[in-house]
Image (cartoon, rainbow, N blue to C red):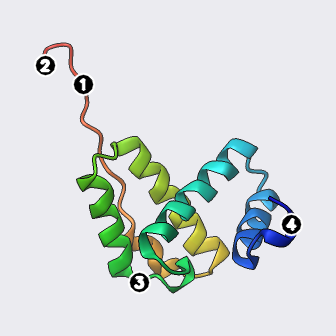
Amino acid sequence: MNQQSISPLRRRMIEDMTVRNFVEKTRNDYIRHVKSFTAFLGRSPDTATAEDLRRFQLHQTETGVRAPAINGAVTALRFFFTVTLDRPEMARYSRSCASRARSRWS
């Protein structure tokens, strides 16, 4: 993907992550999670509401996405809304999942 095909919003998110010295894998993971959220929404993620975030997490759970992946998406979306969009009020609507601890007795 060349620089001209990157949206201004994605470019800004990449710059925000670069300034904070995120490693390439983290940057790629965050972009992937926001892209997945965008596909779910069907519109630009900067127009998302709290209800959209709730529906996205419900969708992830219902489609069998495991807790670690949901938590990765939560972290990426919190960064996106808090840092890139300066909408920290949206971060409180993203909830991490508790993964079920495995016991050798189960």
In the image, residue 21 above or below residue 95: above
Q: What residue type is labelled 4?
A: Gln
* Of the image marks 1 and 4, the number of the one nearer the N terminus: 4
Between the residue at mark 1 and the residue at mark 3, the CA separation in whole angstroms equals: 35 Å
Between the residue at mark 1 and the residue at mark 4, the CA separation in whole angstroms equals: 45 Å
User: Relative to residue 90, is residue 26 drawn left or right?
Assistant: right
Quick one: label 3, few (<14), some, or many (20+) residues within 10 Å? few
Q: What element carries label 3?
A: loop
Residue located at (45% from left, 58% from top): 74
Query: Badges 3 and 2: C-beta atoms under 8 Å apart?
Result: no
Tag nearer the camera, 4 or 3: 4
Between the residue at mark 4 and the residue at mark 3, the CA separation in whole angstroms equals: 29 Å
Residue 5 lies in quadrant: bottom right
Q: What residue type is labelled 2?
A: Ser
In the picture of the structure, the residue carrying the numbered disc 4 is 3
Tell me the number on the disc at residue 37.
Answer: none
Image coordinates for residue 94, horizontal then vertical, percent = 39, 66
| Nearer to the camera, 15 or 65 | 65
Q: What element carries label 1?
A: loop
* Of the image marks 3 and 2, the number of the one nearer the N terminus: 3
* Of the image marks 4 and 3, the number of the one nearer the N terminus: 4
Between the residue at mark 3 and the residue at mark 2, the CA separation in whole angstroms equals: 40 Å
Image coordinates for residue 25, horizontal then vertical, percent = 68, 42
Query: Badges 1 and 2: C-beta atoms under 8 Å apart?
Result: yes
Q: Is mark 2 on a helix, strand or loop?
A: loop
Tell me the number on the disc at residue 49.
Answer: 3
In the picture of the structure, the residue carrying the numbered disc 1 is 102
In the picture of the structure, the residue carrying the numbered disc 2 is 106
- In which quadrant will I find the N terminus? bottom right
* Of the image marks 1 and 3, the number of the one nearer the N terminus: 3
Tag nearer the camera, 3 or 2: 3
